[in-house]
Amino acid sequence: MRVGTFVLAAQFPGQGQGEALHRAVRSAEVAEESGLDSVWLAEHHFVPYGVCPSAVTLAALLLGRTRRIRVGTAVSVLPNAHPVALGEQAALLHLTSGGRFSLGVGRGGPWVDLEVFGTGLAAYERDFPESLDLLLRWLREPRVAARGERFTFREVPVVPRPDELIGGPAQGPEVIVACTSPKSVKLAAEHGLPMLLGMHCDDGEKADMVALWRTHALAAGHPPEEVRNAGHVSAGVVQIDDRTAEATETLVKTMPGWLKQGLDAHVTVDGRPRAMRDPVAYTELLCGLHPVGPPRLAADRIAATAERTGITRFALLAEGSGDLAATEENVRRLGTEVLPLLG
């Protein structure tokens, strides 16, 4: 079982952006101190839901401050970036960290980001498969050219080569795809890439997505052993307390205000209507799905998800209290009290 934290750098009502980023950095450092496996960093633009606009930049900082823990993006929004530029950054972090970097990518949403960065709505609606293919070729081949609808350029050498890790395996960084629909599951499976599954999904939904991924991966010709052992990641929320009611109360008091403020700030690029979750109901849903409560209950919920879905990697949001000291304590308890119960 490989348990890590999911860091959004969430800006809670009344907090400054620097405060949110400081809490994000400290929670990652404490995660390594507490024996956790990984830290997964979210990326958002122009909203207080998360004030980290570059997951790869924050990953570089954390890789420099740590020695053991794996650091990944969850996710870098591929339609906002050129795949080659993102591939160069991923290769650099992979090589300089000794292979501790994982690149998670996703399609994002139809947000105003597409206008600001000049990539346009087509980058979100149509071009994600082409962008993903180009990114993977950059991470796997010595020279790359492009002749697609979106990207066209002459052959150029890949520098630095991600397969030249000193003392490590001759392969590039791990790549993971955030999946929220059958279409994205199929795309990830065809490439043989593991999935990052969202915290809003219950175990049954995640099990169905894993089963669908396996069907498509086998149909695409990937070896059965690789399909069985794919390193999918399940995102969730964690809040450790001696009593379930107190853990739930902590999150229900704080998370709805952050969710409403953060999600309300999203602006669509084309004015399309948005369906918004009720923040209180959503928080209560998350508390019921994920490890929220005493260490034994938390361990049992993680183990139950693993048994139902076959997923053994977890990225758990520990900053739901919005408080620095409480977040650090939550991360410590996850590592020192919950993790040993999982063997």
Image (cartoon, grey):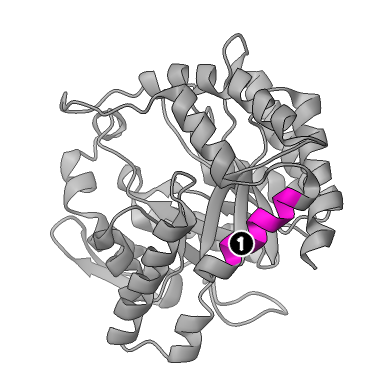
Q: Give the image quarter of residue 35.
A: bottom right
Residue bearing mark 1: 304
Rendered location of residue 206, percent (x, y) = 43, 60
Q: Give the image quarter of residue 210.
A: bottom left
Dominant secondary structure of the residues highlighted in magenta in the image: helix
Q: Which residue is drawn at 54% across and 50% down?
A: 235
Q: Residue at x 45, y 82 (%)?
A: 227
Assess whether residue 222 is covered by the magenta stretch.
no
Assess whether residue 299 is covered by the magenta stretch.
yes
Asked if residue 279 lies left or right of residue 25, the reply is left
Query: Tag 1, which secondary structure?
Result: helix
Asked if residue 121 lies left or right of residue 134, the reply is left
Residue toward you, 212 or 45: 212
* Amino acid type of the residue tagged 1 in the rendering: Ala
Farthest residue, direction top: 14
Rendered location of residue 288, percent (x, y) = 56, 41
Q: What stretch is highlighted in magenta?
A: 297-306
Q: Which residue is drawn at 53% across and 63% down?
A: 91
Q: Quadrant of the C terminus?
A: bottom right
